[in-house]
């Protein structure tokens, strides 16, 4: 009898929890939770909280590495494989860690990205705009910009880079098994992550891109990589210094 009553009580608790309004429904959602829920539910991008900064020393990463090169802006606990689009899990994470950075797991059905130094990225966008290229979202930190592109395979990326005479080491490719820091998180280099170009929808995909789920425009990586390589090669020192 106790076991039966216990199961009934648990079902009542579960039902009560499902009927409770979420912070998003009540209009009191903190900015980072709102951003994480938008990514997970509206755009179907799997997200997870970054490790964040140390409470004792806000300038240091909360991970065990005292010389972490991307303080606060990487997965730790939970790990990258925990990334999800489940709004209940997302709400639980950021309710318990309201200042945690928002990370998107790249690849699979989610966007991939190519990042490069901010100055070089600004020049690349000018060139692509002049060519009439339809670009997707662009994530910006004070030191680096990331262009979101349609998911690509390692084989495709390898073929594209093999055909280049030189690929600057300052270019970073965020594909399957990678991640990207999203707005409005704190940037590891200081300042805040922002949208240089916000996600937008496109009714139909053209030859140079595709509609990302659900309907967000993402260019193909091969459509933009030439401009990114050229712009990054023109950076001071040949773009060889990797700035975070």
Image (tube, helix red, strand yellow):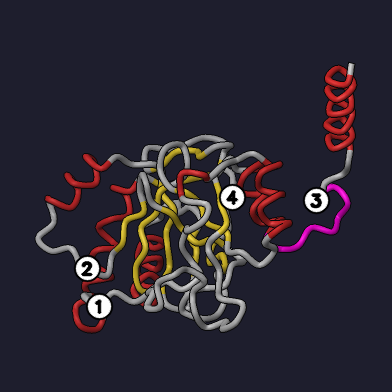
Which numbered disc, 4 or 3, marks the residue that appears first in the sequence? 3
On the image, numbered disc 2 is attached to which residue? 169
On the image, numbered disc 3 is attached to which residue? 24
Q: Residue at x 53, y 67 (%)?
A: 196
Separation of disc 1 and disc 4 at Cα? Answer: 32 Å
Q: In the rendered view, would you say 209 is above or below 191? A: above
**Front of the two marks 2 and 3:** 3
Which numbered disc, 1 or 4, marks the residue that appears first in the sequence? 4
On the image, numbered disc 4 is attached to which residue? 200
Q: Residue at x 57, y 42 (%)?
A: 84
Separation of disc 3 and disc 1 at Cα? Answer: 41 Å
Q: Which mark is residue 168?
A: none
Which numbered disc, 3 or 1, marks the residue that appears first in the sequence? 3
Q: Are the residues tagged 2 and 1 within 8 Å (C-beta)?
A: yes
Q: Which residue extends farthest front?
A: 2
Magenta stretch, overall SS = helix
Q: Residue at x 83, y 31 (%)?
A: 14
Magenta-tinted stretch: 23-32
Closer to the camera, 43 or 69?
69
Q: In the rendered view, would you say 146 is above or below 214? A: below
């Amino acid at each position: 009898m106790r076991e039966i009553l216990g199961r009934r009580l648990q079902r009542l608790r579960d039902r009560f929890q499902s009927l409770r309004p979420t912070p998003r429904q009540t209009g009191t959602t903190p900015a980072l939770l709102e951003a994480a829920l938008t990514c997970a539910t509206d755009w179907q991008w799997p997200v997870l909280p970054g490790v964040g900064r140390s409470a004792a020393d806000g300038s240091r990463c909360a991970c065990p590495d005292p010389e972490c090169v991307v303080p606060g802006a990487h997965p730790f606990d939970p790990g990258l494989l925990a990334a999800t689009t489940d709004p209940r899990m997302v709400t639980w994470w950021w309710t318990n860690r309201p200042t945690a950075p928002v990370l998107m797991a790249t690849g699979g059905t989610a966007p991939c990205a190519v990042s490069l130094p901010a100055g070089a990225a600004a020049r690349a966008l000018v060139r692509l705009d002049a060519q009439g290229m339809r670009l997707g979202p662009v994530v910006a930190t004070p030191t680096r910009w990331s262009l979101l592109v349609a998911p690509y395979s390692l084989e495709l990326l390898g073929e594209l880079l093999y055909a280049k005479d030189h690929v600057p080491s300052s270019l970073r490719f965020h594909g399957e098994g990678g991640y990207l820091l999203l707005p409005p998180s704190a940037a590891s280099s200081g300042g805040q992550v922002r949208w240089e170009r916000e996600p937008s929808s496109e009714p139909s995909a053209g030859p140079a891109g595709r509609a990302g789920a659900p309907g967000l425009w993402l260019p193909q990586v091969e459509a933009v990589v030439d401009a990114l390589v050229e712009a990054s090669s023109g950076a001071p020192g040949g773009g060889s210094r990797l700035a975070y």
